[in-house]
Amino acid sequence: MLLVIDVGNTNTSLGVYNEEHLVAHWRLTTARARTVDEYGVYSRNVLALAGIDSKIITAVAIASVVPPLNPVLKRMAEVYFHQTPLFIDHQTDTGMPILYDPPSDVGADRIVDSVAAINKYGTPIIVVDFGTATTFDAVNKEGQYLGGVITPGIMISSEALFARAARLPRVEIRQPSQVIGRSTVGSMQSGLYYGYVGLVDGIIKRMLEELDGATRIVATGGLAPLIATGSKLIETVDDTLTLEGMRLIYQRNSKMGVRSQESRVRMEE
């Protein structure tokens, strides 16, 4: 079985695949101070709660946008699962040409999201990932990663209001029943929600003008279902898109490794 770990700035998602089937998945808070043992114990515990023996994990793939945690997670995979993990980045063979400048600036999460979207929904496609930052990624009809847009996430906007305006409270992010708020909390919730929906649809509309052909729009990330409810352009919400992209990339590289090994054997013969 394959253990995939997606490390974001706010949350870390884990998933276990048996071939192409996602057996279980979890989400925890990303904590840069966690040790190798803390990550190892947590991983083993959630596996045990799902009835999965950690001994049957035969591979680990990691997509991380938090570089300080990479050596911690590498050591965790080695100590607790006896596996050398595949870290996915712009140099990994994904089958998707990256036209970004420079390619090294593309986050691992944006790469795996795009690979999964290509394989599940076809091209051209726009992927919107609602994380700490909200990212918009564009893939053209030739399956090439073009680039996209990065904006502050809705939670960052909410926290900025709370932190910088003395009389404004911290509020829950939700869809108000009406745009015109009848209270301070209602007005803030309306501004955050409908303002963000307008931002999302506005950016997607402009991106569509630059892409050729009928373009699919897929969203992922924790707040994707909430924002998609108010969006006129998001067609599909895929909660496990990132994990699926990691599986696809791992399997591609695993097969390439097998073929490379077979080629070496034939040459030696």
Image: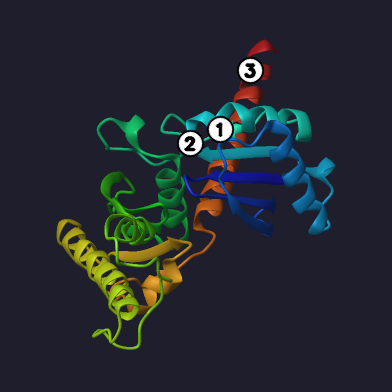
Front residue of 148 and 96: 148
Which quadrant holds the C terminus?
Answer: top right
Distance from disc 3 to disc 1, alpha carbons, whole Å, reads 35 Å
Task: Determine whether label 3 and label 1 are within 8 Å by CB.
Answer: no
Q: Which residue is mark 2?
A: 66
Viewer-nearest of labels 3 and 1?
1
Q: Which residue is mark 3?
A: 264
In the image, taking residue 93 as reference, residue 186 lies left or right, namely: left
Front residue of 141 and 167: 167
Image: 266 above or below 214? above
Image: 237 above or below 142? below
Secondary element at image label 1 = helix
Image: 168 above or below 74? below
Distance from disc 1 to disc 2, alpha carbons, whole Å, reads 6 Å
On residue 108, the disc is none
Residue 35 image point, x, y percent: 67, 33
Which residue is depicted at the point 63% across and 14% down?
267
